Image (spheres, rainbow, N blue to C red):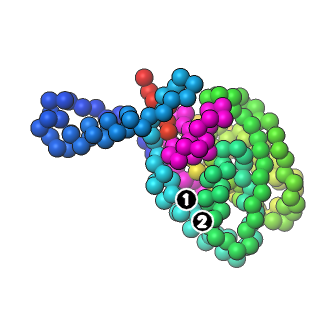
């Protein structure tokens, strides 16, 4: 599912005589009321929890179909993907599925550092096993490429990736995920596990940095 950013614009005189414009104004007002601020930056609602739930369900159906007769190890990339991974793992409802965790870091604040630091490595044996990497977001692809290379050293049967969010315009290396929830523009977002220096992971919706 592709998501675009948009800005509602109003002619206040037309609003008084147009129910549609008035409804748009109410929606805009409610959106402003739901804005959140972190470290002096304002973020507005971008993807609602209901839409997230729909895409998690769709992804789960696709994954369940593809691994119906296979055992699969879900590999959650911490910290950002932990909420998505938990929801997806339950929704897939695969009898022989397992989940484990690995941690990389490539962001400082709002910017990617361009380098990837492994904080917590893989502890399970994945030799001849199907591995499904669970990511919160793929942008440059640097972390994804390094992770795939690291996993290949352990001789897995297969490696695929599912990401809740994907920024195709930002991809500079590697390939996109095999499973994608939302394709989005190159905007900074947070919520539903995604953070700004550790903050905002607990927001149930996804927010985008408000344009000035």
Name the residue that disc number 2 marks: 91
Q: Position of residue 192 (x, y in %)?
A: 57, 46
Residue 54, position as x, y percentages in the image: 48, 59
Circle 1 residues within 10 Å: few <14, some 14–19, many ≥20: many
Could you tell me what secondary structure mostly forms the magenta stretch? loop
**Residue under pointer 1:** 56
Residue stretch rendered in magenta on the structure: 179-206
Answer left or right for 72 relative to 162.
Answer: right
Q: Image height check: is 2 above or below 196?
A: below
Q: Is residue 68 left or right of residue 156?
A: left
Quadrant assignment for the C terminus: top left
Tell me the SS state at disc 1: helix
Q: Is 104 on the left or on the right of 13, as rendered?
A: right
Q: How many marks?
A: 2
Quick check: marks 1 and 2 in contact, CB under 8 Å?
Answer: yes
185 part of magenta stretch: yes
State which tag comes first along the sequence, 1 or 2: 1
For numbered disc 2, what is the local secondary structure?
helix
Measuring 51% from the left and 57% from the top, which residue is drawn there? 53
């Amino acid at each position: 599912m592709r998501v675009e950013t948009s800005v509602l614009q109003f002619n206040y005189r037309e609003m008084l005589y147009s129910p549609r414009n008035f409804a748009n104004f109410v929606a805009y007002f409610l959106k402003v009321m739901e804005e959140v601020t972190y470290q002096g930056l304002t973020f507005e609602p971008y993807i609602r929890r209901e839409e997230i739930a729909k895409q998690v369900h769709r992804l789960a159906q696709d994954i369940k179909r593809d691994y119906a007769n296979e055992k699969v190890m879900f590999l959650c990339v911490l910290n950002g993907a932990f909420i998505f991974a938990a929801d997806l793992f339950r929704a897939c409802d695969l009898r022989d599925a397992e989940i484990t965790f690995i941690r990389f870091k490539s962001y400082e604040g709002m910017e990617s550092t361009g380098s990837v630091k492994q904080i917590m490595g893989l502890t399970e044996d994945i030799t001849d096993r199907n591995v499904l990497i669970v990511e919160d977001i793929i942008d440059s692809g640097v972390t994804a490429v390094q992770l795939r290379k690291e996993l290949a050293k352990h001789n897995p049967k297969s490696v695929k990736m599912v990401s809740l969010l994907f920024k195709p315009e930002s991809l500079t290396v590697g390939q996109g995920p095999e499973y994608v929830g939302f394709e989005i523009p190159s905007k900074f977002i947070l919520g539903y596990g995604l953070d700004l220096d550790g903050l905002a992971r607990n927001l149930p919706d996804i927010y985008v940095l408000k344009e000035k």
